[in-house]
Image: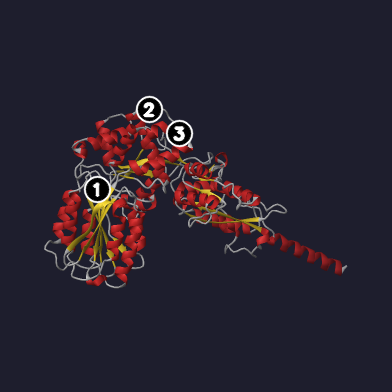
Amino acid sequence: MSKQITVFVLLIIVAALLAILAPRACGYGGVGNIAQQTASGTPPSSPTDAHRIEISIIYAPEYAPFMPKIMEDFNRVSEQGKNPLTGSPWASGQKMIHVSGKDGSSGTVMQGIVNAVIAPGNSNVERPTLYSPSVSHWLALANRQVGHELFTLADAQPTGLAPVVMAIWESRLKAIQQKHPGQPIGWEELLEVMNDPKGWGSYGVSGRSTVYYGHTDPFISSTALSTLMAEFYASSRYNAGQVDRRLTMDNVNNPQVQEGVRKIEAMIKHYSSRTTEFKEYIAQGPEYVDFVALEENDLIYINQGRTQYKPPEKLVALYPKEGTFWHEHPFAVPNADWVTAEQREAAQVFTQFVRSEEIQKRIMDAGFRPANVKVQIGYPIVPELGIDPLQPTTILEVPASDVLAAVQASWQYVKKQADVVLLVDTTGSMAGAKIDQAKQAMRDFVSDQRNSNRMGLSRFGTDTQNLVALDSLEVNRAAIDQAVSGLAAHGNTALYDAVLETMKQLAAGDSTRIRAILLLSDGKDNSSKANLNDVVTAITAARDSRAPILVIPIAYGSDADIAALSAIARASDVKVQSGDPKSITQVLEIIASYF
């Protein structure tokens, strides 16, 4: 009898231990109780590769602030032996899922995936299980490039919605609305301001009268691609009488439509590669730029004061009356040989996890409208942050993929072209590694520029020497490369004289182009006839023209005169870029995207 009791007691103890150790269903509708399931977040044992499915995702930069945590939460529950979507134990025979990922610019990643299919030896190759661009335009363009359905568009699931808006300073929008009381505002009214001889002066806005606009690169940025299409839609309406909701190849190739888009692009102050960098510049305020194309979530980000600069007034979303596009941040699995059937199924589990109500609320916290209709729109999609939750009311139809590709390609000849002079400090302090690395960085910068831009090269020390006169890069590439190779470090620093002389050179050129001086200096002025105030006054005087002369200083090395270069940058409404022999190439890559 005692043996039976002992066995019975042992069975009870074993059962209790098993109950404690067994996975407990969490009734999962989200991830609100994940932290309670494991204090350390470390699984009791690491599953072998045979017992788990590895999937990867590349997502748009807008998701970078929260997607790593979403992946972490998914993996934590999965490693506990549960399906993160349901909270129930994995079914018999099911493998746990582990997801890893990174962010990347939508256009660059799309090209990397295309290259993996048709040019696997290319330096830009990507093979993710899931690709999440900002908008499905890129999926259609990928299909067009490879010549078959690399992505099944009908299967791509939206995960976070954001309309493309014109982010405009509240004072500017109110001034336009006073001119057009009770009327919807769009491209037509923005062009009216630009074409008014007095500009903002006719709208009661003090300060700079010229209209400044900005957007990013449509070969890299989703926002820029959607914006360029919206410009073609607006120009088709006002310059060719085309009011259909679907853009056609005839519209894109119409010379009148193209000229209309050029007029819109004429408002550009400068471009940038990605919104990620551009929104930091925008936050400097109305003196920097009047309006800019953004996803709605980026406008919220700026108004929440999360940028380096605190905005001096509120940005508001202008939903153009002519229409705009929704960015849906789709999750799409490529129909490619690097994705297995079980990875495809696992990707669907992760997709539905991201679309679950709990995760959708978290995505909305970052400024996106929920893709799950069960989640009610709330903060931060509110007027206090410049948003109208009832807009947009007019949505433009996405054109056919061949039209999409034609719009993108058209940017080369409708964009605002640039005149750029590289002004390089070649004083004695630049000797050695500084000058050698600067030479290579300048070569890389020039190679990134399009032939339609014009470029020149000047050097300064005790005096200023124009080594290559401003001309198209088609003509000047070889001459600039040769002149850069011959740069030598010697002499004193007449920085202020060099800037003023180079400004005179640009001022005599074409005022319909972006005009910029890239000033690379590593020291303090010690031999100019002019002073800092002369330079600031000259830049300020040119600031209100259709094409102000931007002086973009690069403080090269630890001895650069940061105070003087900052004053020059502020006069141009830009900021000093900081570089050294190790980082100068990267700094110039960022600046290259301005043009």
Quick check: marks 3 and 1 in contact, CB under 8 Å?
no
Which residue was labeled with disc 3? 397
Vertical position of residue 535 compared to residue 263: above or below: below
Residue 508, how many percent across, how many down? 17, 49
Dot placed on the residue nearer the N-terminal end, 2 or 1: 2
For the residues labelled 3 and 1, the Cα–Cα distance comes to: 34 Å
Image side of residue 60 versus residue 313, left or right? right
Residue 230, how many percent across, how many down? 38, 37
Vertical position of residue 340 compared to residue 563: above or below: above
Which residue is more in the foreground, 536 or 453?
453
Which residue is more in the foreground, 51 or 402?
402
Q: Is residue 247 visible?
A: no
For the residues labelled 3 and 2, the Cα–Cα distance comes to: 14 Å
Residue 308 found in image quarter: bottom left
Which residue was labeled with disc 1? 287
Which residue was labeled with disc 2? 242
Q: Tag 1: Cα neighbours inside 10 Å, few (<14), some, or many (≥20)?
A: few
